Amino acid sequence: MRNLERRGVALLEIVVALVLVSITGLGLVVLVQQTMKSLQDVQRVERETTAASSTLERLTLLGADALDARQGTSRVGTLDVRVARVDAKLYGVAVSDTLTDHVIVYTVLYRPER
């Protein structure tokens, strides 16, 4: 009778071990999925920031006359560019996402009097 009891206890231990391994495995799968989603989000933000920075860099090369001509909002690819004269010598330039209207990069440019 002792041998049957031991077999029953051993079977119970195996079942408990399998349940614990299954729970741990499920937790790892969820962790990997969340990590992959986070990585995709970071890559998307990096692409947006790179595109916005490149657009802003091109605008920083413009003189006061060209910035005056670009005042207002214009679309450049998938981005909105807003140029506003802040002062006689200062221009605010914002590059934002067209869908969310979220400003990705912003700067103020100094252009001396002509």
Image (cartoon, grey):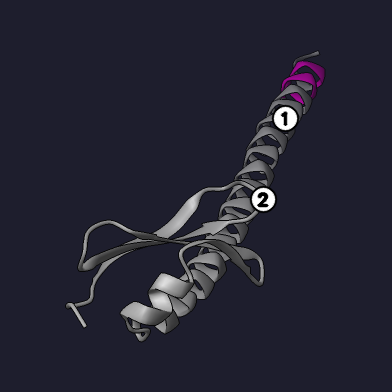
Between residue 71 and residue 61, name the one nearer to us: 71
Q: Amino acid at mark 1?
A: Val
The residue carrying mark 1 is 19
**Which is in the foreground here, disc 2 or disc 1?**
2
The residue lying at 75 percent from left, 22 percent from top is: 12
The residue carrying mark 2 is 99
The residue lying at 77 percent from left, 16 percent from top is: 5
Q: Position of residue 90 (x, y in %)?
A: 23, 65
Q: Is residue 81 above or below residue 21?
A: below
Quarter of the image that includes the C terminus: bottom left
Q: Alpha-carbon neighbours of circle 1 within 10 Å: few (<14), some, or many (≥20)?
A: few
- Which contiguous range is marked in magenta? 4-9
Quarter of the image that includes the N terminus: top right
Are the residues flagged by discs 2 and 1 in contact, CB closer than 8 Å? no
Horizontally, is 56 left or right of 41 in the view?
Answer: left
The residue lying at 52 percent from left, 57 percent from top is: 96
Q: Position of residue 89 (x, y in %)?
A: 20, 68
Q: Amino acid at mark 2?
A: Leu
Q: CA distance from mark 2 to mark 1?
A: 46 Å
In reply to whether residue 97 is colored magenta, the answer given is no
* SS under mark 2: loop
Q: Which residue reaches farthest front?
A: 114
Q: Is residue 36 above or below residue 6?
A: below
* SS under mark 1: helix
In reply to whether residue 7 is colored magenta, the answer given is yes
Residue 15 occupies quadrant: top right
Horizontally, is 73 left or right of 32 in the view?
Answer: left
